[in-house]
Amino acid sequence: MLTQLTVSNYAIAERVELQFNKGMTALTGETGAGKSIVLDALGLAMGGRADAGAVRHGAKRADITATFDVSNIPEAAEWLGQHELDDDDDCILRRVISKDGRSRAYINGQPCPLAHLKELGGLLMDIHSQHQHQSLLRRETHRKLLDEFAGVETLAADTRAAWKAWQQTRQRLTERQQNADEAEARLQLLRYQVEELDRLALEDGEQEALEQEQAQLSQADSVLHSSHQAALLCTEDETSASDLIRQALQQLEQLPVEVPALADTVQMLNEAQIQVSEAGDNLRRFVEDYEADPARLAEVEERLSAIYQMARKHRITPEELPELQARLSGELAELEGGEGSLEQLEADLENQRASFDALAGKLTNARQQAAVELDQRIAEELAQLSMPSVQFVTHLNRNSDDQPAPHGMEDIEFLVSANPGQPARSLAKVASGGELSRISLAIQVVVAQTSTTPTLVFDEVDVGIGGGTAEVVGKLLRTLGSNGQVLCVTHLPQVAAQCHQHLFVSKFTEKDATFSKIEALDDKGRISEVARMLGGVDMTEQTIAHAREMFSKGQATHH
């Protein structure tokens, strides 16, 4: 919902700040006062075209900021989240236009492409005027409105997902068929490579263990010699460590007096003699049991050579060979008969097409039933709007060659026949600006309970009507406002009298400069404005009384 609009130096408006509420808001004022400023500014805030003429004379730039509450607009909140632009429940769209015609766009303070402003703006507001219909002329909008009216958004989303799965499988199958020779060559290569790796049968950690064993076996003579020498030095040589420690102990035992301070030292020497003796025994046993194994060394070196050679062949490290084997084996299995085989892809494609057809068929049936009801209800609304001869048709156009599409098996288009006996044609080709606005109003009234567009803008929807029809238009707009938010520019007192909020636009001249002023009216001011719209320049007591009666009646209207 639109909550605030700030306009600086745009057209003849120097500074405008407006607060908006839920419900129906009417903008009125004398011709040329600048009523279009608000709607044009909103259009720019949502990514509309801009030019240098939009900047107020004498100013460097125009600045427009529109603030929306998206707490109840899940589509907009999701869009903001996906683009990392979410900021609690607020959404601020800003457009800055320089006097040379260049412009910059911002969403929640972050610079963004103009396309993002348009995309997000379409989720927040829809503008209907004699010259601008942001969505009503687009077929995707027709489909969206019909699906919302039919309550099949979930079914439509499931159909879209089924189409996507079918399309992806179809693309994979086409690629496989187009590259059949390459695929066969790849298959043969994979079989050879996997067979080689299987024969090697390298286990995790095997290479490291073999390298350690190889290092020991290749140095067997050095290990045996050094171990024998160490055994001699420990206990068997005349100047062995054990004998030297024994001599040291003898010297301490021959001291003429007992020296308590050396007691710990004596104990340490005794322990050292025991440990040296045990180390010598261990070394002797090791030397006696140790045998060099040239055959095992050759076997280990041959195995390591095979591992290194395989790694060099694939240009990887030996440690990466197990991972390579697993990956190539998986690819081979897929090509030979898994998810990537031609047979499997063809079966998947058939199953996914059947799934899509089932969902699309349900969607078509639901749309057909809803279209009949939608056409009937819109015809009733058009009759109230003094357009009883206009025939509205929701046309379901079957896809050419029955080809699946993301939106199902048919396209949706709203058609109208302006005169009896004439074939129904597209809105853009048949309806005039005023007619299109009223048709749009009728559509929005019918789908208001299901439409996800929270804010609707109608510019001069009442052109060419008056009397009782004008009152009906006011009632319909008030009904829409009761379910959401409606902004409308109107020249009819019957419409203005029924709004929830009334904005009055005027202009004045000061120091040879023209300014536009927009103010929210209280009840007294609203009655005066309705009287002005009724009676023109000269307002009599009768005109004021009529305005008061019209205002009271309009505010008592509930739908």
Image (cartoon, grey):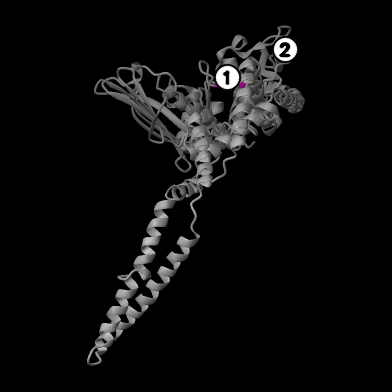
Residue furthest out toward the left: 256
- Residue 411: quadrant of the picture: top right
Q: How many marks?
A: 2
**Residue 210, numbered label:** none
Horizontal side of residue 356 vs 36, given as left or right: right
Res. 124 visible in picture: yes
- Residue 431: quadrant of the picture: top right
Whether 292 is among the magenta residues is no
At 63% from the left and 23% from the top, the residue drawn is 188
Residue furthest out toward the front: 238
In the rendered view, tell whether residue 65 sits above or below residue 208. above
Mark 1 neighbour class, 10 Å CA radius: few under 14, some 14 to 19, many 20 or more: many
Precedes in sequence: disc 1 or disc 2: 2
Res. 472 visible in picture: no
**In terms of depth relative to the viewer, which is nearer, 448 or 353?**
353
Cα distance in 3D space between marks 1 and 2: 35 Å
Q: Position of residue 117 (x, y in %)?
A: 45, 27
**In terms of depth relative to the viewer, which is nearer, 26 or 530?**
26
Query: Which residues are the magenta region?
Result: 135-140
* Magenta part, dominant SS: loop
**Badge 2 element:** helix
Residue carrying label 2: 401
Residue carrying label 1: 437
Whether 136 is among the magenta residues is yes
